[in-house]
Amino acid sequence: MTGGEALAYPVRFAGDTLTLNEAAPGFSDEQLGKARAGEAAALASLIQAHQRSVYSLALRMLGTRDLAEDLTQDVFMQLSSNLKSIESNTHLKFWLRKVTSHRAIDQLRRRARIETMPLDEEITPSSTVDHGDPLLQRHLRLLLLNLSPPARAVLLLRYQEDLDPIDIAKTLDMPINTVKSHLKRSLEILRQETPNPAPVRCEGKST
């Protein structure tokens, strides 16, 4: 980042469900190399390609748009100082998930309880909810925001980002058994506290 260049970051993405798996299909390793070399246009393309997915994860972790926007900008500011360590687009996605998750967990831990009312409408683990029922969506948002920060991160990385437990463990620097334990307990809470829940694949049990 040079010359005081402002970072482009999301302001309002109502209903956005973009994940880092879906982000930037046209952003190549060649463009990443140019961004690493300091080319401003390539860096702007990188931010444009990934900002919505980072914002989406931050929003579901933190619960409010303003906090998610601030965190998204912080993540890309940190990335601009660490680009030379990024080896590929796969590594970039891993890095963005890792930094976003850790920053969100740290922020939540610093705040004993953040105000999340009124709840932002799009904060829902998309694979666990019937989108046609707004009351159910609101109920699940409340349940998600009442999970501990690490459990919330594990659940979102599993069902929003579609990561396997092993990859979640690497992203969060967490033992694999702890990841599985968080998944099992969180899903049990969702099942027990949700009326007529949609079926969700059970984690951590043999079949």
Image (spheres, rainbow, N blue to C red):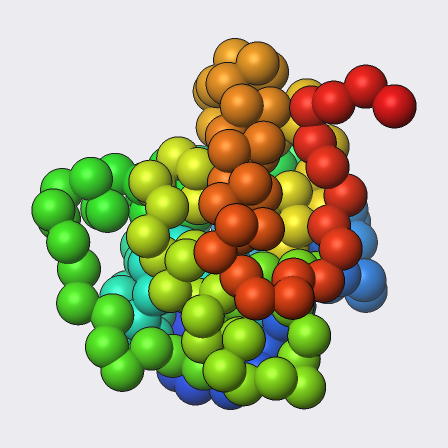
Number of numbered discs visible in the structure rendering: 0
Is 119 displayed left or right of 186 in the figure? left
Name the residue nearer the viewer: 75 or 139: 139
Q: State the residue at coordinates (66%, 80%).
A: 131
Name the residue nearer the viewer: 182 or 107: 182
Q: Position of residue 175 (x, y in %)?
A: 52, 13
> In the displayed structure, would residue 141 be above or below residue 92?
below
Q: State the residue at coordinates (55%, 41%).
A: 188
Can residue 88 be seen here? The reply is no
* Extreme residue in the right direction: 207
Which quadrant: the C terminus? top right
Is 49 displayed left or right of 96 in the figure? right
Q: State the residue at coordinates (34%, 41%).
A: 149
Which quadrant: the N terminus? bottom left
Quarter of the figure with residue 102: top left
Q: Position of residue 194 (x, y in %)?
A: 53, 61
Name the residue nearer the viewer: 5 or 137: 137
> In the displayed structure, would residue 173 be above or below residue 187?
above
